[in-house]
Image (tube, rainbow, N blue to C red):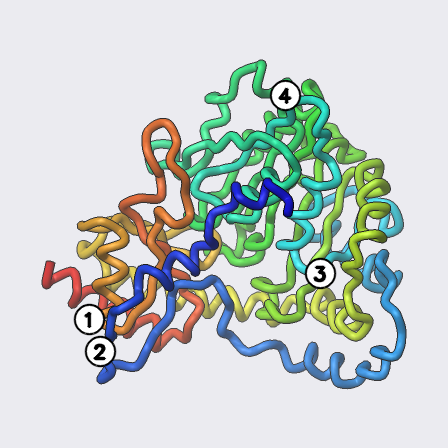
Amino acid sequence: MNSELDLLQPYPFEKLRQLFTGLNPDSSLAAITLGIGEPQHPAPEFVLQALRENLDLLAKYPQTLGIGELRQTAARWATQRFGLPGLDADSQLIPVTGTREALFAIAQAVVNRDHKPLVIAPNPFYQIYEGAALLAGAELKLLNCTAENNFAPDFDDISDEEWQRCQLLFLCSPGNPTGAVLSENILVKLIQLSIEHDFVIASDECYSEIYQDEESPPVGLLQACVSAGNLDFKNCLIFQSLSKRSNLPGLRSGFVAGDADILKKFMLYRTYQGCAMPPHHQVASVAAWSNEEHVRENRIQYRLKFDAVLTELNGVLELRRPSASFYLWPQTPIADTDFAAGLYEQKNLTVLPGRFLGRECEGGNPGAGHVRMALVASVEQCTQAAQRIHQFVETL
């Protein structure tokens, strides 16, 4: 067996299962789950119709590069969304089976084990970054994201020697679990550093279409490349997904776009990996990327949920409305694991302890003392969840 597998920790939801072992939630209350970031809004009917109408394509092997219509539609969407001068659908974009597999795969493709590789990522984080780095044979450096830094990584904490060793920098903006959005100025600085020290930036932007202010969508890495004068997107890749944007987590559909030279080699890797998107999923994805109305409605629903939950919990927990994503990241008045276990047992409500999403670093685990609440259930259920949290906190 690959000895590097021993470096991997259990996934956060396995830790949550272990935490809840032996607990008996109040069966008089309907279960509400805010623990996993799985959108519960209905999948768009026009996407489902496209799937149904193209099931006959299951008789064909899918192309790893994807059908031209999908690449062109995704490239057109990214160009319009991020104000790009253009994005070549044939060389600067590859469809992927969700950002999760692509974020893992990019580390395997770009990390050179022969040069003491360093991968840098935020802490707390989406656990795929850690597994991708370790299984690529790299050392992982984590940057704590705390309230003192508006929950953004402190990139000034990286030495010149570490920048020189860095081969891959994972970004997540809007962030999971905090919802923090990196500014264009920070992104431009990182782009300049990537050129100076020759490392790849992998920007996980799967929450980019869930934001509070309709007039101020989060800036993307390729958008910042334009501001930095990096018009060929050298060393920069974005990872986009339909899971959150279009309530289609089961479709496993997204794309990676940016530096054509990197994507050429990544495409070679993927032909051996065997990860081509099913052909009827590709056609359905064309429909999803072509429609913005359902995405705007999505944002309206999330804003209503934030309004209801924040109104109920104002003054009850220390928390703030993020500018993007569908997560709340409140501080807990007791240990985050005790808070989550108590909520589950007394209120039949699931939230995720923040420490499960972070790692011990200098200064401790930045996730400890927080819980992640994914406002993915209905407005009514999220409102009920907030009421139960309020009642629980009053008993502490």
The amino acid type, in three-letter code, at marker 1 is Gln
Crowd class of label 3 (few under 14; some 14 to 19; many from 20; radius 10 Å): many
Residue 97 badge:
3
User: Which residue is label 2 attached to?
Assistant: 26
Spot occupied by residue 275 in the image (x, y as percentages of width and height)? 77, 59
For residue 339, which quarter of the picture? bottom left
Could you say whether the residue bearing mark 1 is in a helix, strand or loop?
Answer: helix
Report the side of 279 relative to 122 (left or right).
right
Dot placed on the residue nearer the N-terminal end, 4 or 2: 2
Rendering coords of residue 85 (x, y %): 79, 42
Earlier sequence position, callout 3 versus callout 2: 2
Element carrying mark 3: loop
Q: How far apart are marks 1 and 2 (CA)?
A: 6 Å
Near-viewer residue (13 or 214):
13
Amino acid marked by disc 3: Thr
Left or right: residue 313 compared with residue 286: left
The percent position of residue 196, horizontal first and vertical second, equals: 69, 18
Amino acid type of the residue that numbered disc 2 sits on in the rendered structure: Asp
Which residue position holds label 1?
Answer: 346
Amino acid type at circle 4 is: Arg
> Which residue lies most toward the front here?
1
